Amino acid sequence: TPESRKLHAVLLSSPGMGHIIPIIELGKRLVAHHSFYVTVFVAGAASQLPASESKIIEAAMMNPKLFDLIQLPPVDISGLVDPDATVVARLCVMMREARPAFKAALSALAVCPDVLILDLFSTEHFIIGDELRIPKFVYVASNAWFLALKLYSPTLDKLVEGEYVDQPMPLEIPGCRVVRPEDVVDPMLDRSNQQYREYLRMATELPMGDGILLNIWEDLQPQTLAALRDERLLGRIARVPIYPVGPLIRPLEPVGPNTRELFDWLDRQPSESVIFVSFGSGGTLSADQLTELAWGLELSRQRFIWVLRAPTIKSGDGSFFDSGNGSTDMLSFLPDGFVGRTQGIGLLIPHWAPQVNILAHRAVGGFLSHCGWSSTLESIVNGVPMIAWPLYAEQRMNATLLAEEIGVAICPKVLPSKKTVGREEIRCLVRRIMVDEEGNAARKKVKELQKSSQEALCKGGSSYECLWKLREDCKARLLEEPTKK
Ligand code: UDP
């Protein structure tokens, strides 16, 4: 019976490191701390994961290998989306097309699944859970405010006329912080776009599952969580159980010969003296912005590590589906003489850096980040205050949340996705977070949260107990299905 055996959780991720990493970390947690048996599936964009991604996934899975990770066969979506379709639209179509392969893969498993845990882009796979008569959950590897906006979007769709970004007043979600029109998530930027329709569909499907897991802990967003659970405020959508199970982030990577030099350099720097600059797995800057950032860093006279990517026409998610092949000469995009003048003060790393190890190093004292949720958690867990530099997806909301509610970040005056941030402002931002009194307040706050995040994950802590509750809830659901298996 489900009471006496290990439950088999099948996790499904959409492609992209920002999606695969949180799913893997959840899988590890379920196996290592909560007696689940786990299989992870990744729906693939390409036939093979790029080498850099395979390496990271391998590293994440090893020592010890806790579960199988199976890549579903690639799907061809070329005829199904516009050539200029957005990342969200592509992901949705990809996941839809992957459904038959996922179903076939499930029936080929040696051990039948007891529960499905899907990522945000996979709500259309609920039906497979229904067919198998097993509970199905969604892991939203982000925060509660983002979830509140998402769940409330179908209501806003009825209430709000015209584009959200053109509204004169902030968008109201009962019981939650208001959302400034310019902060809405990417799919809400243009209501006539395919991705908006997909977004609304996902938002409508989400509460139909057995629960939603969030990558936060209770003490990070208590008020928003309370609202999400209050039917008087949010009606029917508040009935879906919410499980804050985080922060689930990657552990340190083993340091290989390629990164030895980087960590030797960090070892020689004073404590909390280096700012780390990185825009996640897919973020890119425009050529102008790249130049201004280089100047800003140089003028700040602070030590830095900068993960450098070739510029794109506009700042955004330019390298989401592109793993970078390292063939471009990155340095040619920087101001003349920059490398020479910052020698010994700054390190440039092309394309991808061991971010968790860098943030965990005692020499790192600030993070200029695109505010992807994993990056945000990695910063908080390591007690590093941030300069919030949102680019795409839900990052504008994350930035506002971090600066105005949680108090661990400062922001440029105008959103970087709207206007190039100039060198002088960047110089000030870096100095504010690294040197000035204001940085101290954010640093103090982030250290407090670092502690509360650790407590949440320990035995007896809120996130730890929440995953046990998930297990108990799964068992109860399975017992309600007497004909299963
Ligand atoms: N990451 C990394 N090195 C890099 C860039 C990103 O290790 O040079 C990792 C980062 O540590 C995080 C993930 O990739 O775990 C990015 O996820 P996030 O949610 O921050 O942003 P996304 O890439 O989804 O926009």
Image (cartoon, helix red, strand yellow):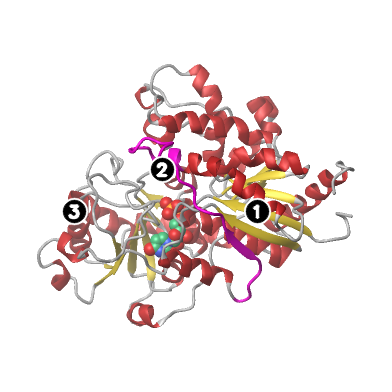
What residue sits right under mark 1 in the picture?
A: 105
The relative height of residue 183 versus residue 377 in the rendered view (above or below) is above
* Distance CA(mark 2)–CA(mark 1): 25 Å
Within the image, what quadrant is residue 276 found in? bottom left
Question: Which labelled disc corresponds to residue 292?
Answer: 3
Q: Is residue 292 above or below residue 158?
A: below
Residue drawn at x 58%, y 69% as measured from the top left? 61
- Name which residue type carries label 1: Ala
The residue positioned 22% from the left and 44% from the top of the image is 420
Ligand 1's quadrant: bottom left
Chief secondary structure of the magenta span? Answer: loop
Q: Is residue 439 magenta?
A: no
Q: Secondary structure at mark 2?
A: helix
Q: From the top left corner, tell me how far across and down residue 383 is, in percent.
A: 48, 63
Tell me: 132 left or right of 181. Answer: right
Does mark 1's beta carbon lie closer than 8 Å to ligand 1?
A: no
Which of the labelled discs sits on residue 309, or is there none?
none
CA separation in Å, label 3 and label 2: 27 Å
Q: Is residue 145 left or right of residue 237?
A: left
Q: Nearer the viewer, residue 483 or 290?
A: 483
Residue at x-position 49% and y-position 39%: 93
Residue 200 point in image, percent of width and height: 52, 29
Q: Secondary structure at mark 3?
A: helix
Q: Are marks 3 and 1 in contact (CB under 8 Å)?
A: no
Q: Secondary structure at mark 1?
A: helix
The reply to whether residue 247 is in sight is: no
Quickly name the residue at label 2.
87
- For the residues carrying marks 3 and 2, which lies nearer the camera in this image? 2
Q: Is residue 186 visible?
A: yes
Q: Which residues fall within the magenta stretch?
A: 63-90
